[in-house]
Image (cartoon, rainbow, N blue to C red):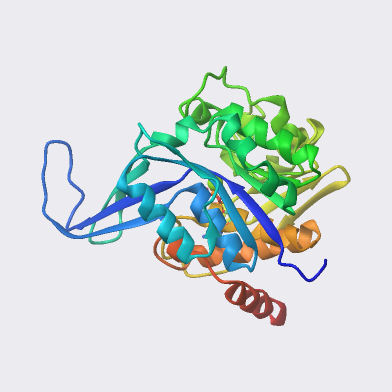
Amino acid sequence: MTGRSPRVVVIGGTYVDMAVRCSQIPSSGQSVAGSALSYSVTGPGPNKAVQAALCGCEVHLISKVGGDSFAAMARKSLAEFKVNTEYVCVAEAMNTGVVVTVVGSTGENAACFYSGANSALQPHDIDAGEQVISDADVCLVHGGLPHEAIVQAIRCAKVHGTKIILNPVRPTESRCIGGESDGDLPMEYFSVDILIPNLCEAAEITDQSTASIRTAKLIGSDIVARGVKYAVITMGKRGCMVVHRDGADQIPAFDVELVDQAGRGDAFAGALAASCAVGDDIRQAVKFASAAGALACSKFGSVEAMPTKAEIIELLQKEDIR
Ligand SMILES: Nc1ncnc2c1ncn2[C@@H]1O[C@H](COP(=O)(O)OP(=O)(O)OP(=O)(O)O)[C@@H](O)[C@H]1O
Ligand SMILES: [Mg+2]
């Protein structure tokens, strides 16, 4: 690596979370008084981008927002985390994606999300960011976007030799987020360097009705046989399974006190991209990512819960001493 910072491009949905606190979550037909309201930028794009930036990377986010006031709020907030939003484009006639969350007194919550402008991300929006994809060490893509845009991102990264990591959603879920789909993932998804599904996503991708730690290796081998270099199947507090052509390794999770699981998958993916961007091997990168995923579980919130590089290193060192 030369003297420059590692570079990561994140392509993922941007949302603004409107969270209302109340004594209890209202049931159908009921109305309760709220006690506090907060707005924060969230979503697979911002969360992953902030995590990579906190790990010391130069980060660009490619995403789409609406022509409303939430868009400016999202940009301002991302800039505070040093995420470049030059390629966050605008669908003037649409709304920015929103999540409306109701949080009860014991931390339980209910949420409804509206994808808004995220469902209108087009291949030409990806083309607009071709230069930053080409200049990046790693391009990290989330699956909750129209297939056409994701396929374009994969093609663009491959043309420029940029390492590509894809964090897919369940094929049945991706059908709901813009564009037509027959429930199968496009074949380009299997040409990426690293695919990081959780266990349920991995099972659905490989047409298995159930999945367990015991079958994770088999499911990972199926994904690798389709062309992916590394399948990293995440399994929450049970750690993750890394499968490649020559075998499989189970990486245990770090032991942390669970406070709020929001954002754990994004922390894992953002930190994995940051570690790969400095040239770490897959085992080192997955360990680093696992520490980030665990730390995100130990704090409230999503973007606010992403750990810094120093916090991740501290947890890794603590574990080494044991
Ligand atoms: N309770 C936990 N304790 C320690 N580490 C955890 C815990 N939950 C998650 N992790 C770490 O984070 C990684 C990703 O978590 P998980 O498998 O739950 O992702 P996910 O289901 O994709 O989450 P999300 O819904 O946020 O996308 C795990 O492989 C693990 O390393
Ligand atoms: Mg996930």
Q: Is residue 285 above or below residue 155?
A: below
| Residue closest to the eye, 253 or 196 | 196
| Residue closest to the eye, 159 or 141 | 159
Q: Quadrant of residue 143?
A: top right
Which quadrant of the frame does ligand 1 lie within? Answer: bottom right
Number of numbered discs visible in the structure rendering:
0
Q: Where, quadrant-wise, is the C terminus in this rendering?
A: bottom right
> Measured from the top left, where is residue 279 in percent x and y?
80, 61
Residue extending farthest right? 246
Left or right: 183 with respect to 100?
Answer: right
Q: Quadrant of residue 193?
A: top right
> Measured from the top left, where is residue 141 in percent x and y?
62, 43
Q: Is residue 17 above or below residue 257?
A: above
Q: Quadrant of residue 188?
A: top right
What residue is rendered at 72% in x and 26% in y? 187
> Measured from the top left, where is residue 55 in percent x and y?
62, 67
Q: Where, quadrant-wise, is the N terminus in this rendering?
A: bottom right
> Measured from the top left, where is residue 178 in percent x and y?
48, 26
Left or right: 177 with respect to 225?
Answer: left
| Residue closest to the eye, 79 or 173 | 79
Left or right: 106 with respect to 64?
Answer: left
What residue is rendered at 66% in x and 30% in y? 151
What residue is rendered at 71% in x and 67% in y? 5
Q: Is residue 70 visible?
A: yes
What residue is rendered at 38% in x and 48% in y? 71
Q: Is residue 293 visible?
A: no
